[in-house]
Amino acid sequence: MERSLQGDTCAYRNLLVELTVGLRHVVRGRARAAGIDAEDVVQEVLLALHLKRGTWVRGTPVAPWVAAIARNKIVDGLRRRGHRTEIPLESVMETLWSDESDSEGQAHDLERVLGMLNERQREVVRAVSIEGHSAQEVAARLQMSEGAVRVTLHRSLKALAAMFRVVPSED
Amino acid sequence: MKTEELIRVLAADGSRPVVPVTRTLWRALGLGVLASTALLLLLLHPRADIPRAIFTVRFDFKLVFALLIAVSAMLFLKETARPLAPERWRWPLGLGPLLLLTGVVVELSTQPAAAWGGLLVGHNAVHCLSLIPMLSLPLVVCLLVALRRAAPMKPIVAGAIAGLVAGGVGSMLYALTCPDDSPLFVATWYSIAIAIVTSCAGWGGKRFLRW
């Protein structure tokens, strides 16, 4: 955690991957009960952990801090999505299916809010996420400065988190 | 988007060391106090008799009361900014009101009952109610902006605590220009003004600090 916050992207990535495994575990049970896609909630929690990582205090245990942020987001996410009394069969099957394979689930909410970013932001996010380019490579390809790419990326993530908060889910 | 892809983006965005939220808060506090003080010096002027007043108990009482409110709230600023916090003793928040109560009792027992009304109303009640919130405003804004980077479990409480800090600092600054030194005046009008700042900031917390 300490190294992650110092800007060690490799350590940070490993940390996020590790946390994701645990998060899936926690989220799935609750999400299944509410009939929503667990992976959507997992992604929302990850985004929150990322943007709020400055609130972790050095030297304190990481787990309770992660749990506190995750709980807040899970409650939020379920409340926002879980207003329905009827649970469609498809969604239950989907959750069942994603439960069997422990592979990456394909979430839809993030895809939807991604569509609400402006074109440049979307381009940068896609280049980093799907094509796995570094900020430097993206900068060269889109003819932007590396700093501008970083700023765009960071703003996009903040915008995504904000959109998650206001856009009701349609599943 | 797959979760793996999202993680890639987050890691790429995490290539700079992150600034701890507490540091952001202290900076905002410093900046806000400076801005509020600048506002005082620009728009108002401190009382001419401060060198003399500083040696009177009633003038110092005002300052100490306001300082106590601000400092006791500051103790909680860091905690409310975090998603989880060890439960802390809340009693420091009671010190300001306790001092105020003591001041009022002493004032009532030393001043004749006929003077109470005049001391309570003072010269500048309206000034007090409008200038304390005005002097607090720069600090409130600084603190709320800093808290947006934080992850408060209870946004309303976090906002209100920021308001209490700012209300205390604003009162202290206003006390330097305010000609009314009676604890009766302070207990009435300063308290109302601080309550206004605190509730507005609490509302601001609800509005802006959700995450």
Image (spheres, helix red, strand yellow):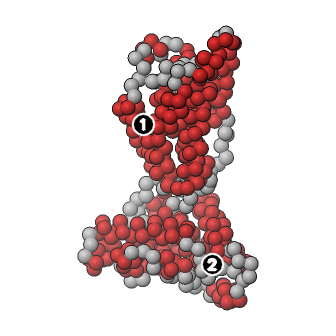
Screen quadrant of the C terminus of chain B: bottom right
Image mark for residue B5: none
Image mark for residue B36: 1
How far across and how far down the image is residue B138, in percent? 44, 42
Is A72 on the left or on the right of B168, as rendered?
right
How far across and how far down the image is residue B126, in percent? 53, 30
- Residue that label 2 marks: A38
Label 1 crowd bin: few (<14), some (14–19), many (20+), radius 10 Å? many
The answer to whether residue B75 of the structure is visible from this angle is no
Q: Is residue A57 above or below residue B5?
A: above
How far across and how far down the image is residue A120, in percent? 35, 75
The secondary element bearing badge 2 is classed as helix
Q: Is residue B68 above or below residue B87?
A: above
Is A88 on the left or on the right of B72, as rendered?
right
The secondary element bearing badge 1 is classed as helix
Instruction: Give the residue type that dot 2 points to.
Output: Ala
Determine the residue positioned at 40% across, 31% down. Answer: B40
Determine the residue positioned at 51% across, 60% down. Answer: A52
Is B39 on the left or on the right of B172, as rendered?
left
Where residue B47 sits, quadrant-wise, is top left
- Number of on-image labels: 2
Where residue B161 sits, quadrant-wise, is top right
